[in-house]
Amino acid sequence: MLLRLWFLPVIGAVIGWVTNLLAIKLIFKPYEPIEIPVFGFRIQGLLPKRSKELAKRIGEIVEQELLPKEELEKELAGLEVKDEIKERILEMVDKKAKERIPPFIPENFQVMIIDFLKKMVQEDLDPEIDHLLEKVRNRMINETDVAQLVETRVSSFEMRELEELVLKIATKELKHIEILGGILGFIVGVGQALIVINL
């Protein structure tokens, strides 16, 4: 009798654990729909079945909640790249001028010519760079569809890659769900055993 009473919680724990394990597997698999001929319906993993809808929703959430256009505008406005651009342009002027100035010109004259060119370019650089950066910021804010970019990126994931990614992030939590299924099954089995005792 005692063995039978222990049997119910153990079976309950196994059923609870296996049920949760299967439920987790069914989030991802099968990747392609499988026909069940006897019952007349198709079975497919939740993520593969709703991958397009999921990608679209992730894109919307990223654009609306994580990276709204106002935040993107602030981030772009705070980028300090102007000095780097100026420095790079002047380096290019210096390099190209040295390559193009004929070697028969004395070195001190070469230095004077290069300095003159760099000074001339530098005078017009600030407003031009400001204008260019403003144009880039405006295009990024007004023409970049963050939701569409994210949706396209998520859609391009192979389902196997997506499964690996989710498992990397949530392996511990999914394992806890499996164990919790076993614990709940065990508790239900104990309840059944208590009912059997009292009958």
Image (cartoon, rainbow, N blue to C red):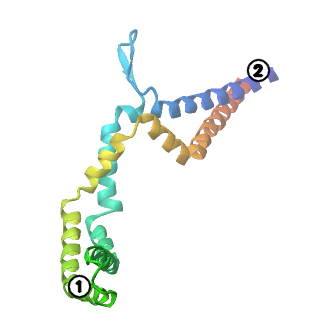
Marks 2 and 1, how far apart at CA: 96 Å
Residue 146: image location, x then y, percent:
27, 56
| Residue beneath disc 2 | 4
Relative placement, left or right, of 119 versus 5 is: left
Does residue 2 appear to the left or right of 189 in the view shown?
Answer: right
Q: Residue at x 80, y 22 (%)?
A: 3
Q: From the viewer's perspective, is residue 147 above or below residue 89? A: above
Callout 1, which amino acid? Leu
Which residue is label 1 attached to? 117
Tell me the amino acid under the disc marked 2: Arg
In the image, taking residue 127 as reference, residue 34 lies left or right, namely right
Please tell me which of labels 2 and 1 falls first in the chain.
2
Residue lying farthest right? 2
Q: Nearer the viewer, mark 2 or mark 1?
A: 1
Q: Residue shown at 30%/73% (left/top)?
A: 99
**Quarter residue 168 falls in:** top right
Along the horizontal axis of the image, is 19 left or right of 134? right
Residue at the extreme top: 38
**Secondary structure beneath label 1:** helix
Picture layout, residue 190 above or below residue 89: above
